[in-house]
Image (cartoon, helix red, strand yellow):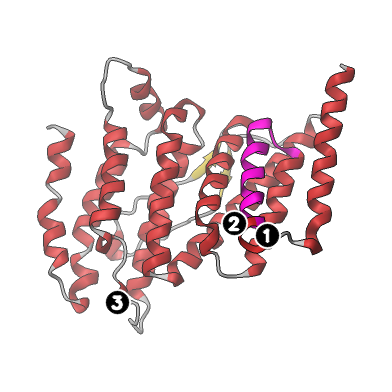
Amino acid sequence: MDHGLEMAAMIPALQELASASPAEYNNVVQKPRQILCQFIDRILTDVDVVALELSKKSIPKTACVMLLDFIQHIIKSSPLMFVNPACQLDQSGHVESSSSDFAKWIITCLLRISAAPNCELLHQKISCVLCSLLQLFKAKSPAIFGTLVKELLDLFRDLSSLQKINAQGCVGGEACRYPFVVERFSVIPDGATEYLTPTTLHVSSVVSVEMLEATVLTVLGDILHGIFFRREVIVIWELGCSVLQYGSPKLRSRAMELLARVVEIGGFPESHAHLFFSAFLQILNTFQTADKA
């Protein structure tokens, strides 16, 4: 069956969701979510299959590209699929938890592709989908947005630590062993959300770490103006400076863009200026070493 026709089969479920009351929402929303998760499971979960499909230049528009476009469309046209602001006062917190887990599961599936060097053709599109999803939660549910931002910052911290270990391992230290499992955006499905199949985020190599970190830098730069707490912005500044010090030229460029956004939005964090200048001196030292070589 044509993938476009299969995706169109979700329309009746979305129409039913649009007419559901807040009391009905958490039950009715499970059907379209399950349909979308089944698509993602079948088309995006096996990273090797995605890479193989991308390598076939005879295919004008691959199923994975179509699905990413579809997810982007759903985020914009049917935000109720992800969150219902009318249910934010749910005293049990079950609706919020369900929406948060659904978002985490999707983010994990997309980040798995971002960590795959052979899927680089999709990385920019995945960044766009992630930015749209987080912007939706920023507008509709600050609480869930805050939860997802915390997970993203923890992931950034993990990747920066791996990057530092890799850099130091190259000069006599002990390098990280791959594949390495990253315990972020974890979900424990309950009875109503068994369709959130177990999914693990892992990095397979140094290049994999860099690719995933590039996506994280891009997404953080896009949502930075929505991050509410100064301490989180300082964490971004510290980790961005770490990327400047230990990252590849491509990552350093992304990190500079992110740090420039921090300064643009909130001014130069003078109390943490030493981190930036230390990283900058490291870059200058790299140039000097290259000249001598």
Question: Which residue was labeled with disc 1?
Answer: 235
Callout 2 touching callout 1 (CB < 8 Å): yes
Callout 2 touching callout 3 (CB < 8 Å): no
- Prevalent SS, magenta region: helix
Counting the numbered discs, the total is 3
Q: In which quarter of the image is the N terminus?
A: top left
Residue 8 pos. (x, y %): 13, 44
* Mark closest to the chain's N terminus, 3 or 1: 3
In the image, what residue type sits under mark 1?
Val
Alpha carbon distance from label 3 to label 1: 31 Å
* Mark closest to the chain's N terminus, 2 or 1: 2
Tell me if residue 198 can be seen: no
In the image, what residue type sits under mark 2?
Leu
The answer to whether residue 87 is above or below residue 257 is: below
Q: Nearer the viewer, residue 270 or 193?
A: 270
Left or right position of 115 against 31: right
Question: Which residue was labeled with disc 3?
Answer: 87
* Mark closest to the chain's N terminus, 2 or 3: 3
Residue furthest right in the image: 292
The answer to whether residue 209 is above or below residue 230 is: above
Give the residues drawn in magenta, as a range: 246-263
Residue 150 pos. (x, y %): 55, 62
